[in-house]
Amino acid sequence: MRNERNFKRKPGRRFDDQQESEGKRRVIKRHSEKKQPASSTRPPKYNNIENSDQKDKIRLNRFVANAGVCSRREADKLIANGEITVNGKVVTEMGVSVSMQDDVRYQGKRLNAEEKVYVLLNKPKDYVTTVEDKHAKHTVMDLVRDASPNRIYPVGRLDKQTTGLLLLTNDGDLTKVLTHPKHNAKKIYHVYTDKPVFSSHLDQLAKGITLEDGPIHADAISFVDKDDKTQVGVEIHSGRNRIVRRMFEHLGYKVMKLDRVYFAGLTKQNIPRGKWRYLSAKEVTRLKAGMLR
């Protein structure tokens, strides 16, 4: 923006166009009479190519933070301690910028600086849990299309007729943690059956049954409403395909409706069916620390 002198009108005084022109001419004349220095110490301006390259770069601490290693403040400490390398060289200076093509590593592992996105969806019926399916009329990606310009994908699966909590992200490391059985990510389902369930069958599911792909048991199980034996709450860690439906079918019940109400410490609170929200920074931190179970 051009830096021009501001002229203010004083009370009781008229400032006409002629006075303004004369004032500007005097200012221009004084500046033109100033001697120019023999040499300038001001650095040359970047040309268009250099400016373009600069725009494609980000601070190293932000690169490390976006890669999911830690916060920017903690990244500064890693850099100062010489724990970050760029293209094979240790960098300890603050304020260094890098591009997405640079080879940035922490503990020998190359980092991906794509900004991480964490979306929690309350999935409705008739949506397939997949990134792309040419045979499906609807996929969950249709519901989160505006959530991020980056590619995100579902963590685990819910079958087409199952509703409830589904996490989508581009954080591969977190996905591995939440989907691997050894990390025991807790899931709770609200099950609606076609007929009342016997209490003895709840005990049987708690102790364990054997399906065609091996033994399985509920970590916790009880009636949701003591006066309605067709509604059962099931806590389970297994991620096997259609596992809750198959457990009840094994005992002669048909699951009429299945809703996942809890996943790794996250709930559907304030998320209407078919809607989504971003996880808070606190929720992401707790998920990575294994605190949400």
Image (cartoon, grey):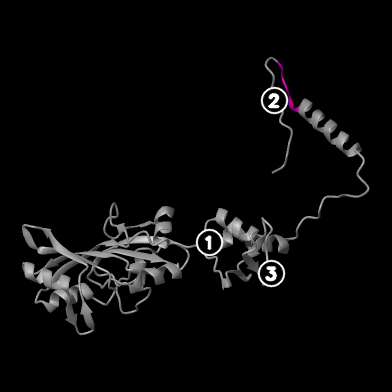
Tag 3 and tag 2, C-beta contact below 8 Å: no
Sequence-earlier tag: 3 or 1: 1
Name the residue nearer the viewer: 188 or 54.
188
Residue for point 38% across, 65% down: 168
* Image position, residue 218 (x, y; %): 20, 70
Magenta residues (range)? 13-17
Quadrant position of residue 155: bottom left
Residue for point 47% across, 66% down: 150
Amino acid at pointer 2 = Lys
Q: Is residue 59 visible?
A: no
Q: Is residue 16 magenta?
A: yes
* Image position, residue 209 (x, y; %): 16, 78
* Image position, residue 137 (x, y; %): 29, 73
Is 214 on the left or on the right of 129, as rendered? left
Residue position marked by numbered label 1 in the rendering: 66
Q: Quadrant of the N terminus?
A: top right
Residue position marked by numbered label 3 in the rendering: 89
Quadrant position of residue 191: bottom left
Amino acid at pointer 1 = Asn
Name the residue nearer the viewer: 58 or 272.
58
Residue position marked by numbered label 2 in the rendering: 8
- In the drawing, what numbered circle is on residue 253? none
* Image position, residue 77 (x, y; %): 60, 56
Which residue lies most toward the top here? Answer: 12
Is 186 on the left or on the right of 49, as rendered? left
Q: How far apart are marks 3 and 2 (CA)?
A: 57 Å
What SS does tag 2 mark? loop
What SS does tag 3 mark? strand
What SS does tag 1 mark? helix
